[in-house]
Amino acid sequence: MEPSRRDALVYLATLVGATVVGPRIAAAPIGPVQAAAFTPAEIALLAEIGDTIIPDTDIPGAKAVGIGEFLAMMITDCYEPGDQQRIRQGLTEITTRYRDEYGGDFVGGPSASRTELLNDLDREQKAHHEDLSPGDPPHYFRVLKELTILGYFSSEVGATQAVRYMEVPGRYDGNAPYQRGDRAWFN
Amino acid sequence: MSAQTYDAIVVGSGISGGWAAKELTEHGLRVLLLERGRNVEHIKDYPTALQPPWEVPHRGRVPTALREKHPVLRRDYVLNEVNYGWWAHEDQHPYVEKKPFDWFRGYHVGGRSLTWGRQSYRWSDIDFEANAREGVAIDWPIRYADIAPWYDHVERFAGISGSREGLEQLPDGEFLPPMPLNVAEQHVADGVRKAFNDSRRMIIGRVANLSQAHGGRSACQYRSKCSAGCPFGAYFSSQSATLPAARATGNLTLRPNSIVTRVVYDRDRKRATGVEIIDAETRLTEEFNARIVFLCASAFNSTWILMNSATDVWPDGLGSSSGELGHNVMDHHFRVGAQGRIDGFADRIVYGRRPTGFYIPRFRNVGSDKREYTRGFGYQGSASRQGWAREVAELGIGAPLKEELREPGPWTIGMTGFGEILPHHDNRISLDRSVTDAWGLPVLAMDCEIRENEQRMRQDMMNDAAEMLEAAGCRDVEATNTGYNFGRGIHEMGTARMGRDARTSVLNGHNQVWDAPNVFVTDGACMASAACVNPSLTYMALTARAAAYAVDEMKRQNL
C-alpha cells in the first residue's frame, strides 16, 4: 500500500473515531409513509421476487440483503399512488400466473419455475418498453427488477461482495489491467 | 442603537466572500464576515462525507414526499439525500418565475463553495474583447493583462490541477500536475485531435482538486464525494482554504445567521457607512459600520441588497442610476451534446473515482472559424465502463444476470456543451414586494430567456459533439438535448455589471459601485459578459484584485 493511501486511512480512522458522532445519515427527512403499506405476506412475496431476480450463488442473493423490506420501502416512498397501484396489481398477477401455470404458491415454489415465470415477465416488460410513448408508466416488472438490482448492488453485501467498493481509493489509475471474471468497482 | 465598527464588512461567505475575507484580513483589515445562513464547520459538519452507499436511505432516488416539498430543487440533481442541507429551500426562500428559472442556492457558511463543480478556467482576451468587437452590451473595463496576475495569485493558493495546452482561447495557469484522462478518453482524444487537425482538443478538466498535497491540505483521495464535503480538505472551499487563512490573521469575525437587508448609505458623503442586518434566528435588526463593504452574496443576492439600499435617493436602489441594475442576467446553457460507445479496451478498467472529467475548449468562432451565431461553447464529459445498473438486453433474470452485472460493462462516453449566453438588457431580475420570504423581505422575480443566438448555438453543440465522437470511432452515437431552464447551469451572472461609464454600468473597473465607491461587488453580479467557461475562478481573481485596490485606496485616504 502506498504511503498516501496508508496515511489517508489512518486519518480516516481518526475522523471516524473522533469527530463523526451520532447518526451519520444526512438530515434529509423521509416523508410520512404514503398510502400502500405492505403486509408481511406481501413483503415475503417481494422478497421471493427479488431473490429470484438475484438468487443466492457463491455469494448471498437478494433475500440476504432484506430486499423485501427494501422494495416495500422504495415503492412506498418513491412512487406515486398510480404506480403503486400498478405494482400491487403486478404482485397479484405474479401470484395468479404462478398458480395457473405451475400450481401452488410463488413464495416457496421451486426456483426453476419461479425463474421461468419471471423470465417470461422480463420478456414482456422489454417488449412493452420497446414501443412506450414518453410519459407512459413503466411496466411493473421493470420497476421491480430495477429496484431489486439497485437494492442489491448498493447494499453492503452487493457493494463489497458482488462488486468491489473502496471508500478511500487513494489514487487514480485510468488504465488498470482487467481480466474477464474480475469484479467491477462500485462507483 | 450603537453600531459596531470594523474596517471592512464582507457579505457572503461563498467563493467570492471567502476570498474577500482572506485578502482583506491578510492586508491587516479587521473584517466582519456576514453570512445569511447557519454555520458549517470544516469536517465536523459534513455528516455524509464518510457515509457508504448502503447508508444512503433511498440509494440515490428521491422520495415522493421530498419531491412534493421542493418544487424547485426537484428539477435537478440538487435535490438528493446526500447534501440536502446545502441547498436553500424554496418554501423559506421563495422567488417569482415570470419565466421559468431554476435558482439553486447555498445559504450557509461556505455557500456553494461546498457543492460547486470545481471546474476552473481562465478567461482570455477573446472573451474580454468580445462585447466591444461585436457591439454587444458594453465593453469590459478590463483586459486579460489586468486579471492575469490575479489568476496566478488565486490559482497558487486554491490549487488547480490541469494540463498546460498553450491555447489562445483558454490560457494556461499556475497548475498542479494534471489528473490523467482514462484510457478510453485518451483514445477518443487522440481521434479528435487527428480528425480535426488539432483545432479541437480533448483535455483533462482543470479542477480545484489537489493532485498533490498543497498549502497544508491533503491530496485528493479519489473518492469523488466532494459535494458531501471533503474530510481531507482536498478541494477548494471556503471551509478548507480561505476561511482558515482569514482566521489565522486574527482579524476575522464571522457572523452566521445574518441576513443583510441593506447597505446603509450616507447621501451627504456619498459613501456607505455600513450595513443593516436581520438576525435570522432572533429576527432582531442590527447595524454594523465599516469603511468599506464587499458584496459577495452571490450574483442575485448582491443585487437584491443594492435594490434595497439608498432607496431614499434612488427608488430602484443603490447602483440603479445607470438603469442597468438587475439587467443583463446570464448563465451557461447546457445539457446538449452527445453520447456513444467505445469499442475495445475490454482488458482495461479504471481504479479510483476521479473528481473531474474531460474538457473540450471552445473551438467555434475562434481563429478563422466563423458561425452564424456569435461566441461559443466548451464541452465537459467523461468515459467509463458501464456499471451494474446497465440494461443487459440479452439476459433475463437470475444467476446469469447477477454474474454479468458483477463485471464491468462496455465503455461509454458522454458530454454536454456549456454555451455562452449573451448579456441582454431584457433578461432581468426585479423586486416583487407582493411576495415575501420567511423574514418578511421582498423577493426577486426572474424574467429571463435564451434567445436566437443561444438557440442556434445549441444546434452546433449537439451536432459538433456527435461529429467528434463519430470521427473518433465511437459507435451508436446519439445526439442529446435534455432541455435547459435559465439558471440551471447555476452560473448566475450579471445584474450589476462592470463598465467604463457610470451611465451604462453599475460598477467601475475595480468593482466599485459608481454611486458609492466604498461598496465593491465582486461576485457573479459584476460580469459584463459570460464567456463559456465556468466562472468561479474569475470571481476569485476579481475579488482578490478589488481587495488589493481597496486597501491601496484606503491607504491613500481615498476610501
Image (cartoon, helix red, strand yellow):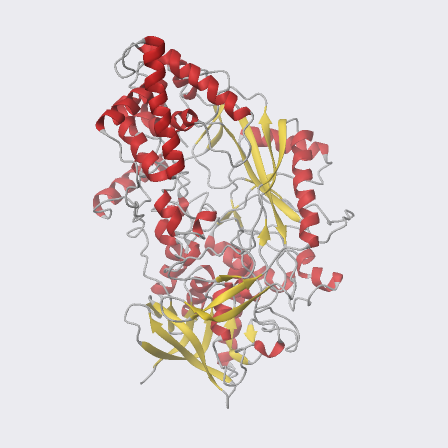
Q: Residue at x 46, y 59 (%)?
A: B15
- Please tell me whether residue A146 is drawn above or below residue A180 in the rendered image: below
Q: Residue furthest bottom?
A: B268
Q: Is residue B171 visible?
A: no
Q: Position of residue B50 (x, y in %)?
A: 31, 41
For this rendering, which residue is in front, A109 or B234? A109
Q: Position of residue B114 (x, y in %)?
A: 41, 53
Q: Is residue A80 visible?
A: yes
Q: Position of residue B271 (x, y in %)?
A: 50, 84
Q: Is residue B132 left or right of residue B117?
A: right
Q: Position of residue A182 (x, y in %)?
A: 41, 18
Q: Residue at x 54, y 77 (%)?
A: B316
Q: Is residue A58 left or right of residue B466?
A: left
Q: Is residue B548 left or right of residue B247?
A: right
Q: Is residue B395 left or right of residue B83?
A: right
State the quadrant of the N terminus of chain B. bottom left
For this rendering, which residue is in front, B67 or B236? B67
- Picture quadrant where residue A3 is located: top left
